[in-house]
Image (cartoon, rainbow, N blue to C red):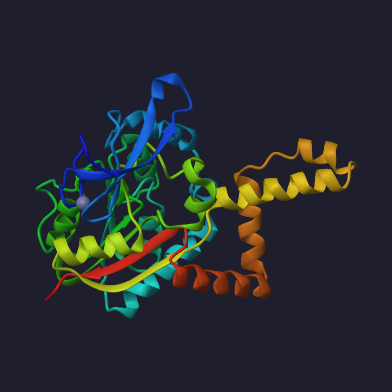
Amino acid sequence: MIISGVFPCPVCNSAWSKFLLEKKGNNADEGSITLYSCAFCDTVYLGSDNQVEYDEQLYAYYEAYQGKNKEEIFNPLTRKSYCNVLRLFDVYGGGKSILDVGCGKGDFVDAAIDEGYNAEGIELSPLAVNIAQGFGLPVSNMDFFSSDIKDSSKDIVTMFEVIEHLSNPVHFLDRAAQVVKPGGLIYLTTPNFNSLDRRVLSVKWNAIHREHLVYFTPATLLKLIHKNTGLTVLHIESKNISSQLINHYKRIGDRFKIKRNDQYVSKIKQHKINSESIDYIRIQIDKSPYMRFIKQSSNLLLNVTSLGSTIVILLRRRW
Ligand SMILES: [Zn+2]
């Protein structure tokens, strides 16, 4: 049923939308999250009153990283994936100056500098900026629309998991197109609303969050770019299965083992799934050529079916 929404579409501003789902908050203060799908451009967006573009409190977890050294908080496997991103830029002749928007504690800036790029980052969370600056990284607490960022000044602008936080993603992409030089590259990633993760986990999917104002599929993201920007799409893919979905299947597997064999019960009850066990899985995949082949093949399948957890897109500003 199409309704006249109180909240207009953040992409095309249409007032007509379809109700998609409601997710109850974990506690009474959070309220619920309601998602709508635009009747005109199909973009999914958050229509709740409690939407928030940036809330410092949500970044309080950076406190836990303060005072730690780089080796403790920068993941070597994530570093490896960043090197693959940099290789993609080389393929398209991207140049060497990079601005990473929403750079967090500077993981990507650090990797890019080590690989010979002239990289800088901007970030809204002062806690994250503090960590990055503590490592000597050129990261500043600055808004992307600041006049300190000059037009046509960068070869590449990167935005890892940023666009879903924006109340006006088109405006932000226009800004990125302004900041890169003619022919420059814009790289972004965002959770895929069409993913296997979202289909299996439904409202429990972690990416459905009051800070995520807009949710893309490869199709709706391409529609936005073709209709609203003059950017050329060089590369688009959807890849990976999230750690949340892996945990979900692992829990089902563990329950099956409990049924099969009672001696597992006490052992499994003690076993707490945490991020370390996900790191363990990532390391095992990385170490084994066979597992790497399985991962590459499943990524190929996820891409063909558009079911991967993350959308990756590389764009070029026209000359
Ligand atoms: Zn729309």
In which image quadrant can residue 293 be found?
A: bottom right
- Which residue occupies the foreground of this view, 276 or 118? 276
Kindly tell me whether residue 46 is visible in this rendering: yes
In the visual, does 269 lie left or right of 172?
Answer: right
Q: Is residue 225 above or below residue 202?
A: below
- Please give the name of the residue rendered at 29% of the width and 60% of the height, measured from the top-left corner: 220
Position of the C terminus, as image quadrant, is: bottom left
In the visual, does 214 lie left or right of 282?
Answer: left
- Which residue occupies the foreground of this view, 171 or 156? 171
Q: Position of residue 108 (x, y in %)?
A: 38, 57
In which image quadrant can residue 236 be found?
A: bottom left
- Which residue occupies the foreground of this view, 161 or 116? 161
Position of the N terminus, as image quadrant, is: top left
Q: Position of residue 90 (x, y in %)?
A: 33, 77
Q: Is residue 201 above or below residue 33?
A: below
In the visual, does 260 lie left or right of 24?
Answer: right
In which image quadrant can residue 235 be found?
A: bottom left
- Please give the name of the residue rendered at 43% of the width and 45% of the height, measured from the top-left corner: 207
Q: Position of residue 175 (x, y in %)?
A: 14, 55
Q: Is residue 157 above or below residue 60?
A: below
- Which residue occupies the foreground of this view, 318 or 198? 198
Q: Position of residue 267 (x, y in %)?
A: 83, 40
Extreme-front residue of the structure: 1
- Please give the name of the residue rendered at 75% of the width and 46% of the height, measured from the top-left corner: 254
